[in-house]
Amino acid sequence: MTVIDISPSVMQFLLAFIVVAPLLGALAALLPAPPGLKGRNPDQAVLRHGVTVTGAVLVAAIVLAAGFDHDHPATMQATTDISWIPALDVRIHLGIDGISLPLLVLTALLTFLCALYSYFKLPAGPSPKAFVALVLVLESGTLATFAVLDLLLFFLAFEMVLIPMYFLIARWGGDQRQAAAWKFILYTLLGSVVMLLGLLLIGLKSGTFDMVALATDNGRGLTTSVQVIAVLAIGLGLAVKTPMWPLHSWLPDAHTAAPTVGSVLLAGVLLKMGTYGFVRILLPVAPDGMRTFAPYLAAFAVVGIVYGSLACLALARTGAKGDLKRLIAYSSVGHMGFVLLGIATMTPTGVNGALFANIAHGLITGLLFFLVGAVKDRYGTADLDTLAGATGAALYGRAPRLGALLAFAAVASLGLPGLAGFWGEMLTLFGAYSPAEGLSRPAFRTFMAIGAFGTLLTAAYMLIVVRRVCMGEHAPHSRLSPDEQSPQAPRAADGPQPSGTAGSQPSGAAGSASSGTAGPRTATTPQLADIHPYEAATWTPLVALTVLAGLWPAVLLGLTDPAVQQLLAGGKS
């Protein structure tokens, strides 16, 4: 069944267009604009170009999804297979199935929303031309990662996103951006070198780099020792990008320093590339090697779940001077732990849960970073003690719609039933209760119990954040000194934005602090700018999809389940 009937050749063109168009758009963004397109403001013209290109890619992705045969989601569709390097049997092989299609659409959506947001709120930094070009190159590399079906092309696409993200952090980031960018690039590059060795080992030992042929063979052409070495090498590279504890330490620094759209793309898109590699490559190509390392992967996953939650609790406590962006970054370590736990079960239930949690995390954490960026713009800081201790009635009383939306994203992130975050975590825990044959049930049930405990910790720190940021705290009970209770001076607006936005608002926060007001909003409590139209346009799709995926999970599971079943069965239906 397809929503619209599209010929195979058009489907091929759409997928190729989705992968290549952002790259061509990035090149066009760096060229001088034609006289008729310069407009009065060249900077706005290039930002509009970014919105146009990412919008066209999103439309193409939606049409591709509409033409996808939902009755056969396990079959590779829209395939292109062209010889590229005959000597190594490397081919330009593209295709999508029920596993890659949701990630493709998510990437196109988040990148478009980031381009739209940047049109009105460009982060402070060098030329907008370079900013737009880097975002488009990053989009092209991410989309290619989810669309290619050749191991070497996968590696090239996987690496293609590193340089754009490095410059987005280093040139458009906040405090400590250079150190954070270097840490990001060094960790990911070192992991990638090890991963390349594992990919070459599989290709040379099996005689092909074709991911479909390797998945169908299901490891029968590789000895157990080769599979173990390959899983260790490739798994390390993928674990760094995921990121898995204890290889996660680059993530909080990168998120804290990155501009808002950089954090959204890093959490919503780039982290998914690592877990996708586990599902697309290691599970079907080296099942014996995965079975050897699955208990260790699950153990690291649940440690990450608990560690991320405890780190968030430490940042959220009064007087810790915790950064809200850093807290959300540590929450990603915990959420991606659930994804890794689902993959480690090697069961359809667990892997489907991991894929669902991937999409849910992209929607919810992307929304959270948008919201935290908006709060930081209004207050001039993301310091939790400042936001909570010196803001009078806090967001509920000062910007009620923004406060309500932040509370919604927080409860979605903690896994409230009826929202997208619930299903992924529940399915991964179900998968851990009954892991694949050959894996220790007592061990995985222990991991399940630890993961379930992690959900309680997640609820604890998210509710603390809502209470402190949205409801505020009474100044007399604050542990902060009077000087610390005053928010930081408002910073200049990051870039072009409509008049009357948050740039001039943080002074109201200082007025609230000096007056010592607390509790319910009064006539003397200065207001912050609430949600602007461009923010509403950016965030509404994420809210709607979070609710839709929570209330109607069959839309996503109907795509992933047949593909996962076939992948784990070695290409057999």
Image: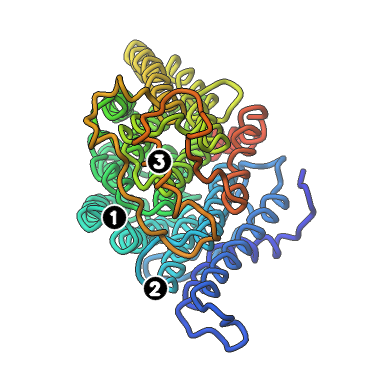
Total numbered labels = 3
Neighbours of disc 1 within 10 Å: few (<14), some (14-19), many (20+)? some
Please name whichever residue, 472 or 211, is drawn nearer the observer in this view of the structure: 472
**Residue at the spot 31% in from the left edge and 38% down from the top edge:** 383
- Foreground mark, 3 or 1, reads 3
Instruction: Examine the rendered structure and indicate whether residue 234 appears above or below residue 95.
Output: above
Alpha-carbon span between mark 2 and mark 1: 34 Å
Alpha-carbon span between mark 3 and mark 2: 32 Å
- For marks 3 and 1, the one nearer the N-term is 1
Asked if the residues shown at circle 3 and circle 2 are in contact, with their CB atoms under 8 angstroms apart, the answer is: no
**Residue at the spot 40% in from the left edge and 34% down from the top edge:** 391
Residue 207 seen in render: yes
Q: Which residue is label 1 attached to?
A: 196
Asked if the residues shown at circle 3 and circle 1 are in contact, with their CB atoms under 8 angstroms apart, the answer is: no
Q: Is residue 160 left or right of residue 17?
A: left
Q: Which residue is label 3 attached to?
A: 509
Alpha-carbon span between mark 3 and mark 1: 51 Å
Q: Check disc 1 and give the amino acid type.
A: Leu
Residue 127 tag number: 2
- For marks 2 and 1, the one nearer the N-term is 2
- Foreground mark, 3 or 2, reads 3
Query: Secondary structure beneath disc 1?
Result: helix
Neighbours of disc 3 within 10 Å: few (<14), some (14-19), many (20+)? many
Q: Position of residue 263 (x, y in %)?
A: 40, 49
Instruction: Examine the rendered structure and indicate whether residue 99 appears above or below residue 9.
Output: above
Q: Position of residue 243 (x, y in %)?
A: 32, 40
Q: Check disc 3 and give the amino acid type.
A: Ala
- Foreground mark, 2 or 1, reads 2
Residue 93 seen in render: no
Q: Check disc 2 and give the amino acid type.
A: Ser
